[in-house]
Image (spheres, rainbow, N blue to C red):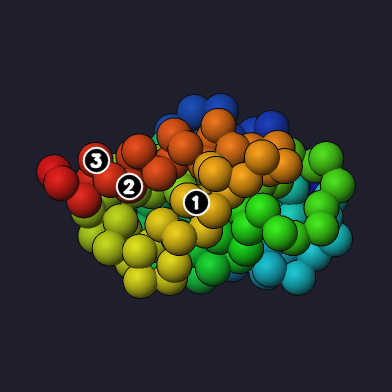
Amino acid sequence: ASAADAIAMLANDEPTRALIVEAGALLPLVTLLRAGTEKGKASAADAINMLVDDAPTRALIAEAGALLPLIALICPSRACTDTGAGTIACDILERLAADPRLHELAEEHGATGVLAAAAHSPDCEWADEARNALRATHCAHFA
């Protein structure tokens, strides 16, 4: 998780983000996102969140297999500690949805249903972020 934290801290401008992606950081981040501890998943999500701003990287994030683990972080029924991972995952999916190709892929992976469940769950800490991401996915759908 400390490497993911370092990536998140370093990824503060486009040239640095491009170097991080070129160095092959996405696959290890997705692995941590998929199989890490709650803290590790939150750190990986935070690092990916810093990388998702660049349009070319968005497709690479999806190709690296990040969609399913991100969607899993949003599920309001999962037991989680307050790591912020669900909130961050919603933010990432909101920005990925801006790309119509990625929007379709996210829908195929069930993102809309999970976002809707989180958005309407009274116990979900990231319900507001889920609503924002859900709006973004609907706007992308009709664009």
Quick one: SS at disc 3? helix
- Expressed as whole percent of the image width and height from the top left, the position of residue 28 reads 66, 65
Q: Are marks 1 and 2 in contact (CB under 8 Å)?
A: yes
**Residue at 62 percent of width and 45 percent of height:** 121
Q: Which residue is mark 1?
A: 115
Q: Which residue is mark 3?
A: 139
Q: Quadrant of residue 54?
A: top left
Residue sitting nearer the eye, 32 or 130: 130
Residue type at mark 2 is Thr
| Residue designated by label 2 | 137
Separation of residues labelled 1 and 2 (CA atoms): 10 Å
Secondary structure found at label 2: helix
Task: Determine which quarter of the picture holds residue 103.
Answer: bottom left
**Residue 9 coordinates in the image, percent (x, y):** 69, 32
- Residue 56 appears left or right of 83: left
The three-letter amino acid code for the residue at tag 3 is: Cys
The spot of residue 141 in percent (x, y) is 21, 51
Name the residue at 47% across, 51% down: 116
Is residue 50 visible in the rendered image? The answer is: no
- 49 horizontally vs 52: left or right: right
Q: CA distance from mark 2 to mark 3?
A: 5 Å
In this orientation, which residue lies closer to the viewer: 7 or 95? 95
* Placement of 5 over or under 13, stated as above or below: below
Residue located at (52% from left, 58% from top): 114
N-terminal of the pair, mark 1 or mark 3, is 1
Name the image quarter holding the C terminus: top left
Q: Amino acid at mark 1?
A: Leu
